Image: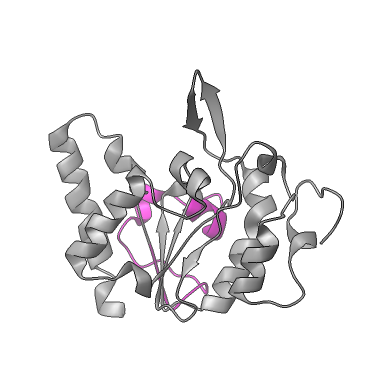
Amino acid sequence: MPAVEHRGDATPFLPDRKSLKALREAAAGCRGCHLYANATQTVFGEGRRDADLMLVGEVPGDREDRAGHPFVGPAGRELDKALEELGIARADIYITNVVKHFKFEERGKRRIHQTPKKLEVDACFPWLREELRLVKPEVLVLLGATAGKALLGSKFRLTANRGKEIESDLAPYVTATIHPSAILRAPDDEARQRERRAFTEDLRTVLARL
């Protein structure tokens, strides 16, 4: 493990032996960008090494940062509801984020999520690249615009690609939908229910590919 901080690139922190276990252990000491300094811990991806379905979100939230596991907060509960309705066992898939450290600003006693900047996404990308290489999912679902732009480029637009098959060599089938946190940001209960149904239907489209 490098003894010095390498700002802007996690590559020096990648282990020589490439396995999910080795990557997870190495990522715990990553200093590839400044986000590690305020985060509680690295939140690495979790799931089956041979998962057919891989979901990629944006960045850990407050609950994830404290627990050390991806998608265990309010947005994770929304994801779990959709997976349960579709009969997809979370233990059978692989879930991760583009950025592995929580980015936030403090407001009183609260830590408010912030969208990572491109330089932070780029710095952390080597971890995601290795996760994709090892898992080799049949279906890759990008959750939100940040994940889409990180993997497909800055011209990616969620509104234009949501629920559609996206041509990419990342996986045999690639698609995108909203990040489940968008459900929580809906202005009222009716809107939340509508977003929840649409999110579930987006995920339903991948079932035929699994």
Q: Nearer the viewer, residue 200 or 113?
A: 113
Q: Residue at x 57, y 69 (%)?
A: 131
Pick the residue in front: 188 or 109: 109
Q: How many marks?
A: 0
Query: Residue pushed farthest right?
Result: 3
Q: Position of residue 27 (x, y in %)?
A: 67, 59
> Where's the C terminus, which quadrant?
bottom left
Residue lying farthest top? 108
Q: Residue at x 50, y 78 (%)?
A: 49
Residues in magenta?
147-175
Please give left or right for residue 14 compared with residue 194 in the image. right
The reply to whether residue 125 is in sight is yes
Indicate the position of residue 10 as horizontal and vertical percent values. 73, 56
Determine if the magenta segment contains residue 153.
yes
**Residue drawn at (74%, 70%) of the image:** 15
Image position, residue 21 (x, y; %): 61, 72
Q: How far across and how far down the image is residue 107, in percent?
A: 50, 20
The quarter holding residue 116 reads: top right
Decide if residue 60 is in sight here. Answer: no
What coloring was used for the rendering?
one colour
On screen, residue 152 above or below 6: below
Query: Left or right: 119 with respect to 83?
Result: right
Residue found 26% across the figure and 63% down from its top: 83
Q: Image check: 82 left or right of 110?
A: left
Observer-nearest of 4 and 169: 4
- Residue 31, compared with residue 142, is above or below; it is above
**Position above or below: 139 against 157:** below
Q: Nearer the viewer, residue 77 or 131?
A: 77
Question: Which quadrant of the figure contains the N terminus?
Answer: bottom right
Q: Looking at the image, which residue sits at the far front?
A: 67
Asked whether residue 135 is drawn in magenta, I would say no
